[in-house]
Image (cartoon, rainbow, N blue to C red):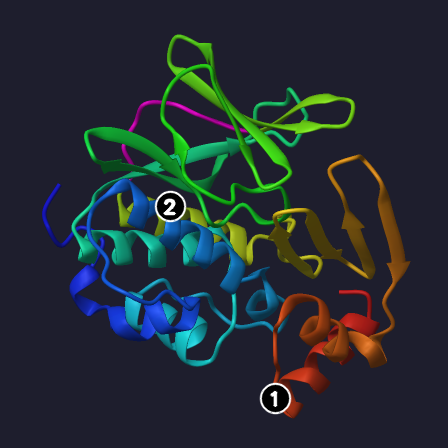
Amino acid sequence: MSDSMWNGGDLDLGAYLARIGLTGSVRADAATLRAVHRAHVAAFPFENLEIVLGRPVPLEIKALQDKMVARQRGGYCFEQNLLLAAVLERIGFGVTGIGARVRMGSDVVRAVTHMALKVSAAGEDWLCDVGFGGEGLLEPLPFRDGVRERQGEWTFALERAEPDVRVVRTLHADGWFDLYAFGPEERIPADYRVMNHYISTHPRSPFVSRLVVQRTEPGLRRTLVGSVLETARPDGSVRQREVRAEELAEVLSWEFGIELDDEDAETLARVYSSGS
């Protein structure tokens, strides 16, 4: 891969680090990788508001920086992980793209529609993924078959399911739960542009038909899917409630840290109340 594969040169690294609240020097080592990944997850919610508002989802680094850093919004997997890839490349890490098939507990073989990263640091490879939403990693996971790691109050595993297939799992109260699977093929930004077009425009995409906003914390997972706000804890306890259109902007701000201007808040409320 070339040094400019992820367009790290287009990034304002200082502004990004300020946005995620990371101070001090950064270098291409495991400690920095963990710190950046953890702070990114804490700062940026998973969200598909642009799609619901009927707007395109540009993946150029300057567009991602304007949306997620300057305007303090979030994004979904391609936005989140492409921004992270540019950051890590700029710092000096080796970054390889991964294309994954979402499982979410099902054995149905789906298309490759998720993005993750393999990152080299300190002589070891790490699975990095800041874009899976409510069930996603908080920190990098060692890229080793059979690894199991506790992150906050959540536990994750990377298993080899078939000779060329690895599966990322998380531990639920009732046992292991498959999140997604991926093979050995390296992906490049052009691959993600194609995936992004389908996910952001096709009527069968789950992100076109409903609002999806998620945030992962060390001991709490928050999700707003459609009109249902859910909070889940590691012991399996779940609380749900319906969110009304008139309180949507307040919920997005309070629960997910997403601040909308008045025009976007009004437009989103109209789309939301129409059942889109």
Look at 58% across and 72% down and name the residue there. Answer: 54
Q: Secondary structure at mark 2?
A: helix
Which residue, given by chain and number where applicable, does mark 2 sit on? Answer: 34
Residue of label 1:
261
Specify whether residue 116 is painted magenta.
Answer: no
Count of numbered circles on the image:
2
Magenta segment boundaries in residue numbering = 180-187
**x 18%, y 50%: residue:** 5
Q: Name which residue type carries label 1.
A: Asp
User: Is residue 87 found left or right of 157 in the rendered image?
Assistant: left
For label 2, count other residues whose C-alpha is less than 10 Å away and answer few (under 14), some (14-19) or many (20+).
Answer: some
Q: Is residue 262 above or below residue 179?
A: below
Q: Give the amino acid at mark 2.
A: Arg
Residue occupying the far front of the picture: 24
Left or right: 208, with 144 as reference point:
right
How far apart are the alpha carbons under marks 1 and 2? 33 Å
